[in-house]
Amino acid sequence: MKKEIPNLGIGVGLRPVHYEEIFRDKPAIDWFEIISENFMVDGGKPLENLQRILEFYPVVQHGVSLAIGSPDPLDFDYLKRLKALTKITKTPWVSDHLCWGRLPGANYHDLLPLPYTKEVIDYVAERARIVQDYLELPFALENLSSYVGYKSDEMSEWDFYSAIVEKADIYMMLDVNNIYVSSRNHDFDPNTYLDNIPIERILQIHLAGHTDYDAYVLDTHDAYVRDEVWALYGEIYPRTKGVSTLLEWDDNFISFQQTWDEALKAKAYQKKLETTKKSDVKLMRGLIHEVHQ
Amino acid sequence: MTFDAKVPTELKEIQKWFASIITRPIDSNSKMMPISPSGLKMIDEARKYILPSPTMQADQRIQIYNQQYWWRLITILQENFPLVTCLFGYDGFNQTIAVPYLVKYPPSHWSLNLLGSTLLKWVEEDYEGDDKALVFDAVAVDYAYNDCFFAEKKEALNFSIVHVEELSVKKITLQPHVHLFELDYNLFEFRSKMLEQPVEYWIENDFPPLTKGKFYFILYRNRQDYILSDTLDHVAYQILERFSQGSSIDGICEWLEAQDEKTCETASLNMQKWFQDWTALQILSLE
């Protein structure tokens, strides 16, 4: 890890439903995250809107289609387009998901979980290193919300995730909502996850809402961030030296101002907890409770 | 299309199995098929690969991915084909169009913008309803709107800076975002009326009238990148059709010389205005 990663502050995922409000009000938001693929087009309205956003805000690219653990060769046509977009956005880093989503000739348009094995670590880490080298930008992989565990798993998700980013010498795009969702679906303690990942590799944190169906929890990005997820954010943020934080909201949209207000709740945790030490867990939990009162 | 030479065998096998399960259609209650492709009960087959959780069996867990696959793709097709969805209603669209289409032409590209790129082909090959012609045209127009939104905009032809002699021989084309339609009814007016109401409205109510007759349309993106449609004169349509295949001004003149008197007269009366309009709209470019 050579490059200094900037802390952009608090951002929101840029979605077309909010364009009118953003262009009209020019809200004082720190930065926007875009879904890269929505702008990897030949032209038209999407790129025009992106140019208008870039006049006022830093933009970070987050992808959904790299599918790095897929069994087919890396798609360099896709990577070429992705890299071309980085020249337009001047994104300080690029992220995508630790998943698979393709077979040769087929694309499932989903973030499918990988088996947690040593062989898969080697396979994915090599590809992740190639992607980072090709893009010539810091590259981060995001942990998934997952709904299945494989019989062939040899280790925990956090050990698998950590091993890949270490071996590839890349970064973590840590989604704390996904940690919570997966902890419920796989019955593990989310704090154990946070205690066992290389904190220095986190370059960004994602927050989002989810839907609880009792038997399982679905990562829906269509609701306010749950208290349990804020609590995890409160646990992890102080351990970082301060990393960019982003709220994702993708369905059942509320106004941009309401979305931004929700994202700004993170600020309370950052201010109150920034001097808290990792060992002061009891104090930290008390402060989290206070923030929610 | 091949596998990466370094992919672990076990990973590849799990992925092939996983894909074979999640791409099978779900039933009307969103349940996965109870029998696996290999003939085993899904609950037994899923156990070979998937761990149960404290609250769910292995087959229930992979069913979540099976549902997500279909819900996601069908929703995108509904969004990209709003007129077709209005014609059938959500359930009708899903069962009659989306599911059989996706079974025959599952997505192969990372861009969801291309998800419906072969729907027209599918309608031509597989759709058997009495309204096949209308469905075919509705798919074509809906897809054109989608394509128009994302298509490239090349440098527009500017008659004031291109030399006249050069212009007479250089091939002119239409911008990639321009689509032309020759229809036996006013589908564009029908479409805009249909889209004024939610999809469910048309289950209970009669469709608006579909005016019969020969209609020629152009669909394009204007300077502000808004998508617009206009009706065209038949001769103007024919000239733009020739430009869509790449034609010089000389080529257009040669073609006109071979047409009937009425066509030539219409062209000579309107040609200057048409070119002024097309230049102002920036729909022409040099090949």
Image: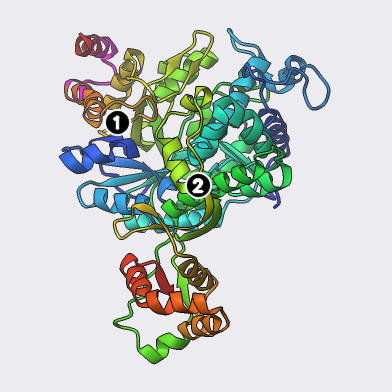
Contact (Cβ within 8 Å) of mark 1 with mark 2: no
Residue B269 at what x, y percent from top left?
39, 77
Residue to which mark 1 is pinned:
A240
Which of the two residues, A133 or B58, is positioned nearer the viewer here?
B58
Badge 1 local density, few (<14 within 10 Å), some, or many (20+)?
some
Write the residue at 31% across / 16% down. A231
Task: Name the amino acid, label 2.
Answer: Leu
Residue A158 at what x, y percent from top left?
49, 26
Residue to which mark 2 is pinned:
B187
Q: Quadrant of residue A190?
A: top left
Which of the two residues, B33 or B92, is positioned nearer the viewer here?
B92
Residue B77 at what x, y percent from top left?
54, 38
Magenta region: A272-286
Tell me the element at label 1.
loop
Residue A8 seen in the figure: no
Q: Is residue A21 above or below residue B137?
A: above
Write the residue at 46% across / 49% down. B145
Write the residue at 49% across / 8% down. A214
Q: Quadrant of residue A219?
A: top left
Q: CA distance from mark 1 to mark 2?
A: 58 Å
